Image: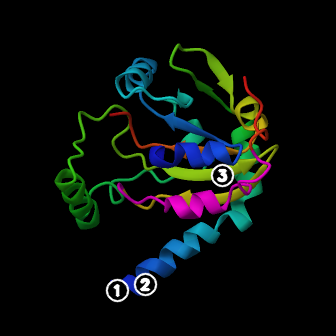
Amino acid sequence: MSKRVERSDRARRQAEPADNGPKRVLALRALTVLDPEGAVVKIADILDRGPTVLVFIRHFG
Amino acid sequence: MRGVLSEIRGRGAELVVIGNGSVYFAKTFREDLAIEFPVYTDPSLVTFKAAGLRRDLGSTVNTKVLSGAFRALKKGFRQTSTQGDPWQQGGVFVVLPPSDERFGYVSSAAGDHPSNEAVLAALPPLSGAADARKNS
Protein backbone atom coordinates (compact mmCIF):
# COMPACT_ATOMS: atom_id res chain seq x y z
CA MET A 1 0.00 0.00 0.00
CA SER A 2 1.43 3.37 -0.97
CA LYS A 3 1.90 6.19 1.48
CA ARG A 4 -0.69 8.25 -0.38
CA VAL A 5 -3.35 5.59 0.20
CA GLU A 6 -2.36 5.35 3.85
CA ARG A 7 -2.71 9.12 4.31
CA SER A 8 -6.10 9.23 2.63
CA ASP A 9 -7.25 6.40 4.86
CA ARG A 10 -6.16 8.36 7.91
CA ALA A 11 -7.89 11.49 6.61
CA ARG A 12 -11.08 9.54 6.07
CA ARG A 13 -11.07 8.23 9.62
CA GLN A 14 -10.38 11.68 11.05
CA ALA A 15 -13.31 13.02 9.08
CA GLU A 16 -15.58 10.36 10.57
CA PRO A 17 -16.83 12.40 13.57
CA ALA A 18 -18.80 14.70 11.31
CA ASP A 19 -21.20 11.81 10.93
CA ASN A 20 -20.79 9.80 14.10
CA GLY A 21 -19.52 12.31 16.65
CA PRO A 22 -22.77 13.53 18.22
CA LYS A 23 -24.17 10.02 18.53
CA ARG A 24 -20.89 8.72 19.98
CA VAL A 25 -20.59 11.45 22.61
CA LEU A 26 -24.22 11.10 23.67
CA ALA A 27 -23.70 7.37 24.12
CA LEU A 28 -20.52 7.92 26.13
CA ARG A 29 -22.13 10.55 28.36
CA ALA A 30 -24.60 7.95 29.59
CA LEU A 31 -21.83 5.59 30.73
CA THR A 32 -19.46 5.38 33.68
CA VAL A 33 -15.83 4.47 34.30
CA LEU A 34 -13.82 3.62 37.40
CA ASP A 35 -11.15 5.82 38.89
CA PRO A 36 -7.92 4.25 40.25
CA GLU A 37 -9.53 3.97 43.69
CA GLY A 38 -12.47 2.04 42.29
CA ALA A 39 -15.02 4.85 42.49
CA VAL A 40 -17.64 5.07 39.76
CA VAL A 41 -17.39 8.27 37.69
CA LYS A 42 -19.88 9.44 35.09
CA ILE A 43 -18.30 10.30 31.75
CA ALA A 44 -20.82 13.15 31.52
CA ASP A 45 -19.24 14.66 34.65
CA ILE A 46 -15.76 14.38 33.10
CA LEU A 47 -16.85 16.02 29.85
CA ASP A 48 -18.83 18.79 31.55
CA ARG A 49 -15.68 20.10 33.27
CA GLY A 50 -14.49 21.61 30.02
CA PRO A 51 -12.72 20.78 26.75
CA THR A 52 -11.42 17.23 26.98
CA VAL A 53 -8.91 15.18 25.05
CA LEU A 54 -10.35 11.74 25.74
CA VAL A 55 -7.81 9.03 25.03
CA PHE A 56 -8.83 5.39 25.07
CA ILE A 57 -5.71 3.29 25.47
CA ARG A 58 -5.29 -0.34 24.49
CA HIS A 59 -3.96 -1.38 27.87
CA PHE A 60 -2.01 -0.15 30.86
CA GLY A 61 1.69 -0.90 30.78
CA MET B 1 0.09 12.77 23.81
CA ARG B 2 1.69 13.12 27.22
CA GLY B 3 4.40 15.27 25.63
CA VAL B 4 1.87 17.95 24.72
CA LEU B 5 0.06 18.01 28.08
CA SER B 6 1.12 21.61 28.77
CA GLU B 7 -0.14 22.68 25.36
CA ILE B 8 -3.45 20.90 25.93
CA ARG B 9 -3.84 22.62 29.29
CA GLY B 10 -2.74 25.91 27.79
CA ARG B 11 -5.84 25.67 25.63
CA GLY B 12 -8.01 25.22 28.69
CA ALA B 13 -8.46 21.50 28.14
CA GLU B 14 -7.57 18.36 30.06
CA LEU B 15 -6.06 15.09 28.93
CA VAL B 16 -8.15 12.18 30.22
CA VAL B 17 -7.10 8.56 29.73
CA ILE B 18 -9.41 5.56 29.86
CA GLY B 19 -7.85 2.10 29.92
CA ASN B 20 -9.49 -1.27 30.25
CA GLY B 21 -7.43 -3.17 32.81
CA SER B 22 -8.35 -3.68 36.44
CA VAL B 23 -8.57 -0.85 38.95
CA TYR B 24 -5.28 -2.11 40.40
CA PHE B 25 -3.57 -1.73 37.01
CA ALA B 26 -5.00 1.77 36.63
CA LYS B 27 -3.59 2.73 40.00
CA THR B 28 -0.13 1.28 39.40
CA PHE B 29 -0.06 2.82 35.89
CA ARG B 30 -0.73 6.25 37.37
CA GLU B 31 1.74 5.82 40.21
CA ASP B 32 4.57 4.07 38.36
CA LEU B 33 4.58 6.61 35.54
CA ALA B 34 3.82 9.59 37.82
CA ILE B 35 0.81 10.47 35.67
CA GLU B 36 -0.45 14.00 36.33
CA PHE B 37 -3.73 13.79 34.43
CA PRO B 38 -6.93 11.84 35.19
CA VAL B 39 -6.79 8.11 34.56
CA TYR B 40 -9.85 5.88 34.54
CA THR B 41 -10.59 2.33 33.54
CA ASP B 42 -13.45 0.37 32.07
CA PRO B 43 -12.75 -3.37 32.32
CA SER B 44 -16.23 -4.06 30.92
CA LEU B 45 -15.18 -2.42 27.59
CA VAL B 46 -18.69 -0.92 27.31
CA THR B 47 -17.31 2.60 26.78
CA PHE B 48 -14.84 1.32 24.17
CA LYS B 49 -17.71 -0.24 22.26
CA ALA B 50 -19.84 2.91 22.57
CA ALA B 51 -16.94 4.92 21.18
CA GLY B 52 -16.86 2.68 18.13
CA LEU B 53 -13.37 1.37 18.80
CA ARG B 54 -12.07 -1.76 17.16
CA ARG B 55 -11.61 -5.05 18.92
CA ASP B 56 -10.39 -7.90 16.77
CA LEU B 57 -7.45 -10.15 16.06
CA GLY B 58 -6.61 -8.60 12.68
CA SER B 59 -6.02 -5.14 14.13
CA THR B 60 -3.73 -6.56 16.81
CA VAL B 61 -1.53 -9.00 14.92
CA ASN B 62 -0.28 -7.88 11.52
CA THR B 63 2.95 -6.80 9.86
CA LYS B 64 2.26 -3.09 10.40
CA VAL B 65 1.93 -3.69 14.15
CA LEU B 66 5.14 -5.72 14.24
CA SER B 67 7.10 -3.03 12.38
CA GLY B 68 5.67 -0.40 14.75
CA ALA B 69 6.70 -2.50 17.73
CA PHE B 70 10.22 -2.78 16.30
CA ARG B 71 10.44 1.00 15.84
CA ALA B 72 9.23 1.51 19.43
CA LEU B 73 11.84 -0.91 20.74
CA LYS B 74 14.57 0.96 18.84
CA LYS B 75 13.44 4.16 20.56
CA GLY B 76 13.72 2.47 23.94
CA PHE B 77 10.04 1.87 24.60
CA ARG B 78 9.30 -1.57 25.90
CA GLN B 79 5.85 -2.93 26.45
CA THR B 80 5.47 -4.87 29.66
CA SER B 81 2.86 -7.55 30.23
CA THR B 82 -0.51 -6.65 28.76
CA GLN B 83 -2.70 -5.06 31.43
CA GLY B 84 -6.04 -5.03 29.69
CA ASP B 85 -7.80 -6.70 26.81
CA PRO B 86 -5.16 -7.78 24.26
CA TRP B 87 -7.50 -7.45 21.25
CA GLN B 88 -8.86 -3.99 22.09
CA GLN B 89 -7.74 -0.96 20.08
CA GLY B 90 -7.80 2.64 21.22
CA GLY B 91 -8.83 6.03 19.95
CA VAL B 92 -8.69 9.75 20.63
CA PHE B 93 -11.61 12.18 20.82
CA VAL B 94 -11.66 15.91 21.47
CA VAL B 95 -14.95 16.89 23.08
CA LEU B 96 -16.18 20.34 24.01
CA PRO B 97 -19.00 20.40 26.54
CA PRO B 98 -21.57 19.25 26.57
CA SER B 99 -21.44 16.97 23.51
CA ASP B 100 -19.48 18.63 20.73
CA GLU B 101 -17.00 16.17 19.25
CA ARG B 102 -14.43 18.28 17.45
CA PHE B 103 -12.08 15.47 16.57
CA GLY B 104 -12.25 11.72 16.50
CA TYR B 105 -9.70 9.06 15.68
CA VAL B 106 -10.38 5.35 15.79
CA SER B 107 -7.11 3.43 15.78
CA SER B 108 -7.00 0.80 13.09
CA ALA B 109 -4.21 -1.17 14.77
CA ALA B 110 -1.75 -1.12 17.63
CA GLY B 111 0.59 1.85 17.19
CA ASP B 112 -1.90 3.76 15.00
CA HIS B 113 -2.31 7.17 16.62
CA PRO B 114 -3.37 10.61 15.41
CA SER B 115 -0.74 13.32 15.24
CA ASN B 116 -0.44 15.65 18.22
CA GLU B 117 -0.88 18.56 15.81
CA ALA B 118 -4.25 17.27 14.64
CA VAL B 119 -5.47 16.90 18.21
CA LEU B 120 -4.24 20.35 19.26
CA ALA B 121 -5.83 21.93 16.21
CA ALA B 122 -9.24 20.72 17.41
CA LEU B 123 -8.90 22.51 20.75
CA PRO B 124 -9.78 26.15 21.44
CA PRO B 125 -7.00 28.60 20.51
CA LEU B 126 -4.32 29.44 23.07
CA SER B 127 -5.44 32.97 23.89
CA GLY B 128 -8.23 33.31 26.43
CA ALA B 129 -8.69 29.57 26.88
CA ALA B 130 -6.84 29.06 30.14
CA ASP B 131 -9.97 29.19 32.31
CA ALA B 132 -12.17 27.14 30.01
CA ARG B 133 -12.04 23.99 32.13
CA LYS B 134 -13.51 23.86 35.61
CA ASN B 135 -11.20 22.49 38.25
CA SER B 136 -12.63 19.62 40.23
Q: In front of the other: label 3 or label 1?
A: 3
Residue B94 numbered tag: 3
Residue B60: where, in percent of width, then height?
32, 54
Residue at screen point 77% across, 45% down? A26
Residue B87: where, in percent of width, then height?
36, 46
- Chain of the residue under the numbered disc 3 shown in the image: B
Residue A2 numbered tag: 1
Residue at screen point 70% across, 32% down? A46
Q: Do discs 3 and 1 belong to a common subunit?
A: no
- Chain of the residue under the numbered disc 1 shown in the image: A
Label 3 and label 1: CA atoms lie apart by 29 Å
Residue B88: where, in percent of width, then height?
42, 46
B120 with respect to B72 (left or right) = right
Which secondary structure lies at badge 3?
strand
B56 with respect to A53 (left or right) = left
Q: Start and end of the magenta stretch?
A: B110-129
Label 2 and label 3: CA atoms lie apart by 25 Å
For the stretch drawn in magenta, the main secondary structure is: loop
Can the viewer see residue B70? yes
Which secondary structure lies at badge 2?
helix
Q: Between B46 and B76, which is closer to the camera in this rendering?
A: B76
Q: In front of the other: label 2 or label 3?
A: 3
Q: How many marks?
A: 3
The three-letter code of the residue at mark 2 reads Val
